[in-house]
Image (cartoon, rainbow, N blue to C red):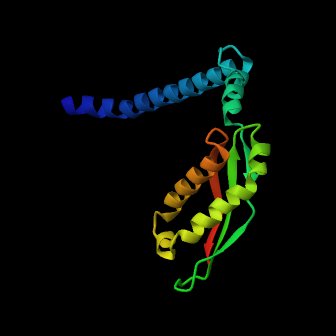
């Protein structure tokens, strides 16, 4: 008799399972649709995109900078070097309002860069970390000429040994 009861209850199990799965799916769809409607209609108080934009002007004011391009430079490397020249182009990031002062000092800046880059050997330029070291050295020299308060950074746009 126990076997007969098990046989009768066995077909009921999949029916109960499928009913609970069906109710679960219907409930999930209804909750999803209700959440979408509440968000779309504005019933939920979500932050507006304008609230995030109001904080950006203060940050953007700090990021404002002017760029002063340096004339492209071709520096000869000397007789013993494998490459015969260095082609160098960069831009100076200056504080707002200092662009005119920096442009007025451009002949001195180019002189300092020519003098420094001519003194650097080809082996020093070819090292893996050379560009970072050269960038720091160039920035420091330009800041000495134009004033550290005027020059924020230097952006090397071309550095080709040929």
- Quadrant of the drawing holding the N terminus: top left
Residue 71 in the figure: left or right of residue 123: right
Q: Is residue 72 visible?
A: yes
Tally the numbered discs: 0
Q: Is residue 1 visible?
A: no
Q: Residue furthest left?
A: 2
Q: Of residues 110 and 124, which is closer to you in this image?
A: 110
Q: Of residues 25 and 80, which is closer to you in this image?
A: 80
**Residue 118 sits above or below residue 152 on the image:** below
Residue 139 in the figure: left or right of residue 74: left
**Residue 135 sits above or below residue 87 on the image:** above
Residue shown at 57%/81% (left/top)? Answer: 78
Residue shown at 65%/14% (left/top)? Answer: 45
- Quadrant of the drawing holding the C terminus: bottom right
Q: Of residues 130 and 7, which is closer to you in this image?
A: 130
**Residue 57 sits above or below residue 147 on the image:** above
Location of residue 57 by image quarter: top right
**Residue 83 sits above or below residue 146 on the image:** below
Q: Position of residue 154 (x, y in %)?
A: 63, 52
Q: Position of residue 141 (x, y in %)?
A: 58, 53
Q: Position of residue 3 (x, y in %)?
A: 21, 33
Q: Position of residue 46 (x, y in %)?
A: 65, 18
Residue 26 in the figure: left or right of residue 52: left
Residue shown at 37%/34% (left/top)? Answer: 11
């Amino acid at each position: 008799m126990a076997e007969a009861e098990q046989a009768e209850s066995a077909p009921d199990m999949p029916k109960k399972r499928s009913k609970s799965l069906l109710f679960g799916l219907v409930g999930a769809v209804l909750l999803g649709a209700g959440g979408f409607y509440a968000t779309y209609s504005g019933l939920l108080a979500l932050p507006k995109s304008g609230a995030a934009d109001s904080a950006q002007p203060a940050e953007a004011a700090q990021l404002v900078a002017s760029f002063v391009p340096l004339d492209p430079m071709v520096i000869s490397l000397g007789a013993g070097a494998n490459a015969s020249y260095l082609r160098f182009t960069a831009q100076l990031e200056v504080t707002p309002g200092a662009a005119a002062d920096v442009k007025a000092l451009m002949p001195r800046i180019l002189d300092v860069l020519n003098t420094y880059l001519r003194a650097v050997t080809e082996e020093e330029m070819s090292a893996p970390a050379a560009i970072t070291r050269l960038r720091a050295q160039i920035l420091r020299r330009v800041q000495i000429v134009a004033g550290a308060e005027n020059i924020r950074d230097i952006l090397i746009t071309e550095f080709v040994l040929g």
